[in-house]
Amino acid sequence: MLDTGREYLRGELQRLDLLLHREILRLRASYQLSLDEFRGLYVSDSQVDDLLREAPDGQGAPDPAGLTERAVTLHRSNLELLDDSSPWSRLRQNLSLSPFEVDALLLALAIEVHPRYETLFAYLNNDVSRKWPTCDLAFRLFADEEPWQLRSYLTPNSRLFSRGLLRTIASSSDRISLLSSGFALSPELSRFLLAIPPSFGKLNEFLTRIEPQRSWDDIPLAAVLHERLKRAPEILAKACNCGESPLTVLVGNYGMMAEQIAEALSTQLRRPLVRARRSCRPSDPCPGAAHALARAVAGPPKTGLPPRAARL
């Protein structure tokens, strides 16, 4: 059976290779560089040429317009590979992402797939230390219109950043423009797009992700209460009209079996469990824990059923 998500990603990386090749040609023409000159401090043209030859589609004619046309044609054929079950389809449809936003995520995912993209990014960023995608690079590669019309997609308050799909990369400079700012894919979204199972264990000082194993038979409760708790996700889903099992947070003190019940629910629903603990006094605000919990339990927003959570 064809893995449409994997085939789509392979095809889209080939498209990215074409667009990167085009931008390198444009850069060399703009600065009138010879093959013996250097860009990005220590990243030479010969190094970049070697990397481009490693690309699956790296033997094409070195014509920027031709590379753009080939990239467009390849993108159309790649989209035809997708079905509704593909991670890329679910991400695009559930979050109503624009084509440019999906391309920005692809650009950030590339360095998780192959380290050669770090060298290519550094070359095009004209800085060997910036081995990551930047807003400027995203605009140069994917903008079919004036870049300023797309800036709202990559501001710190944009959907990609506010929903935790992308994160900013800290700069050593006190002042940095939007164009020069770098970004990276969130680890959770990277695992989702690459079909890597979620990691278990301690996530940070507040949260631990657990692979649930406890069943209802392991909890000493009356049978009637067992049945009511088993139906809780279904009842809540109907009440909120959300069409799927809603995020369930059980709050309780020691001895109330909140964690055990949450784990049994997670086992029943075949979903991971996130345990959150406050590291500050109950009377004090704890924004760090709240933010960490929101990011962890949400994961890639609406890309699948959310995990269950228990706070003790």
Image (cartoon, helix red, strand yellow):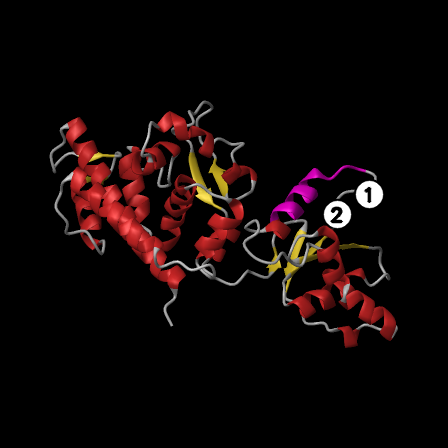
Q: What residue type is labelled 2?
A: Arg
Which residue appears at 66% of the width and 48% of the height?
A: 293
Residue 195 higher or lower than 98, as above or below? below
Membership of 288 in magenta stretch: yes
- Residue located 52% across and 46% down the image: 95
Farthest-out residue, top: 175
Location of the N terminus (image quadrant): bottom left
| Residue 221 seen in render | no
Q: Name the one closer to the observer, 119 or 153.
A: 153
Q: Tell me which corner region of the image, top left, top right, bottom left or bottom right, holds residue 175.
A: top left
Q: Looking at the rendering, which quadrant does residue 35 occupy?
A: top left
**Relative to 99, is 216 on the left or the right?**
right
For the point 52% across and 38% down, which residue is it? Answer: 159
Residue highlighted by disc 2: 278
User: At which x and y percent is residue 255?
Assistant: 86, 62
Q: In this view, does 39 lie above or below 109?
A: above
Q: Where is residue 267 in the image (x, y as percent from the top left)?
A: 68, 69
The stretch of residues the image draws in magenta is 284-295
Which residue is identified by label 1? 282
Q: How far apart are marks 1 and 2 (CA)?
A: 8 Å
Q: Is residue 74 left or right of residue 216?
A: left
Q: Nearer the viewer, residue 164 or 303?
A: 303
In the image, residue 202 lies at what x, y percent? Answer: 62, 56
Q: Which mark is residue 51?
A: none
Residue 220 located left or right of residue 89: right
In what element is the residue under mark 2?
Answer: loop
